[in-house]
Amino acid sequence: MTATQVFGSYASAFRNQDLSPNVLHHAKRAVLDWYAALLAGQAVPPVSQLQALLLSESGQGSARLADGRRTTARTAAFINGAAAHAAEVDDSFRDAMYHPGAATIAAALAVAQDTGTSGMEFLRGVVLGYEVSTRIGVVLGRAHYRYWQNTGSVGVFGAAAASAGLMDLQGEQFANALATAATFSSGLQQAFRMDSMSKPLHPGRAAEGGVLAAQLAAQGVTGSMDILDGDAGMGRAMSDGPDWTRVGATLGQDFHITRLTFKNHIGCGHTFAAIDAALHLVQQHDLPPHSIKHVRVATYATALDIACYDDPRTSNEARFSVPFMVATALIHRSVRLAAYTPERLGNPDIRALMKRITVEVDPELDAIFPRRRSARVDIETNDGQRYTRDQPDRKGDPELPLSDAELEEKYLELATPVIGASKAERLLRAIWALDEVENMEALVP
């Protein structure tokens, strides 16, 4: 079987597979974190511009935006997928170098609302989207990530699989949805190597493309079954010709959705190990910023390639700046939304400390990427003291997970300013009870 047929076969089996309470709980955690990211991203460009453009062209539908407005499933998936990535606070699956939630849950929610399905079926669609897409991302590997942003290029498979599952497509129909989604795959890393608004459009477009691919498959549209593993397929065109033979080996046994990373800071996740190490040192040794003479950050090469701004001038650039984010952590002991206000961007104390921070690649830390996202921080003080912290994992990684309480705290911090405390609490309760919800109206904030 081709890779798409492997997934089509699994979709048929998945239809009758009971999901354990543990898998369902982790799926709810993913949905909760997605809503935190969605609501935080409502005011971040280009979400408002996208709404103005698409809603003016859209007819009525049954899918909903975060503010409750009705639209078509594809439009809702596009806008919500973009919003869920815009604030740089969405989940990730480390081994696939991929933020699965933004596109997958946006598509699943839109289709679930459009078809009037139950909360349990919605959760099953989310799980299926995560399990299929993360495996595709793992196979494509680091060679793909060099030029492509997996959140767009791989996200379209999460959206397509979740949508197809909710439409009850199985076997060849499910495989056709993935095959069509593959030829929609896109999202260039160069889009955010300069200050731009393009990056959130990647998962938005992926969510829309996944919904469309599933809708087309439901109408009988076929795709190339070997689009992933063929001689001119995605593996060769967009990676280094990887081996697809074991892409489905652990399907139904090892659920990737139980090993997600949920962000404990806001910004590029490649900076987080360095932030965690810096926070540990400054808190353990009670180091005031003015006492710090020099900070040396060692990490893996991709962190420097993507979080590449040494002198950020906009909030977008600051989210991808190791010196800015580490300096912010050392001074304010937190890197959340307040870090990217105009006052913080131009803060003279942050700017002065940034000049005393150097960042370099450590070959040993680079060799274990993407399995581990590690950093080492050395701080030298003005009185000659030296402090070092090795940070093998990030807070929020599977090895150091956020508890349910910490995840709720993050959600409430981001959701409450947008929809108010009572609505945020009501939505929180609805998410934890999703497997008992009869229709998706309960998830309209």
Image (spheres, grey):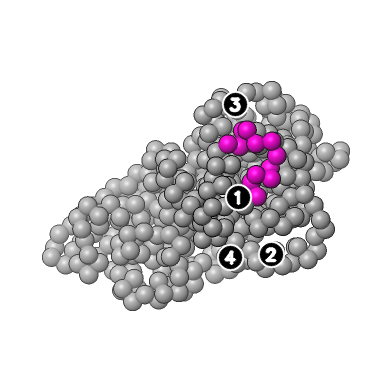
Observer able to see residue 419: yes
Q: Which residue is mark 4?
A: 43
* Disc 2 residue type (three-letter): Leu
* Disc 3 residue type (three-letter): Leu
Q: Taking 348 as reference, is 88 left or right?
A: right
Distance (Cα) linking label 2 and label 3: 36 Å
Q: Which mark identifies residue 102?
A: 1
* Disc 1 residue type (three-letter): Ala
Q: Taking 299 as reference, is 184 left or right?
A: right
Q: Which residue is mark 3?
A: 19
| Residue located farthest toward the left when viewing the structure as drawn | 383
Establish if 16 lies above or below 156: above
The mark nearer the N terminus, 1 or 2, is 2
Pointer 1 with pointer 2, Cβ within 8 A: no
Judging from the image, what secondary structure is the residue with disc 1 in?
A: helix
The residue range painted magenta reads 433-444
The mark nearer the N terminus, 1 or 3, is 3
Distance (Cα) linking label 4 and label 2: 11 Å
Q: Which mark identifies residue 338?
A: none
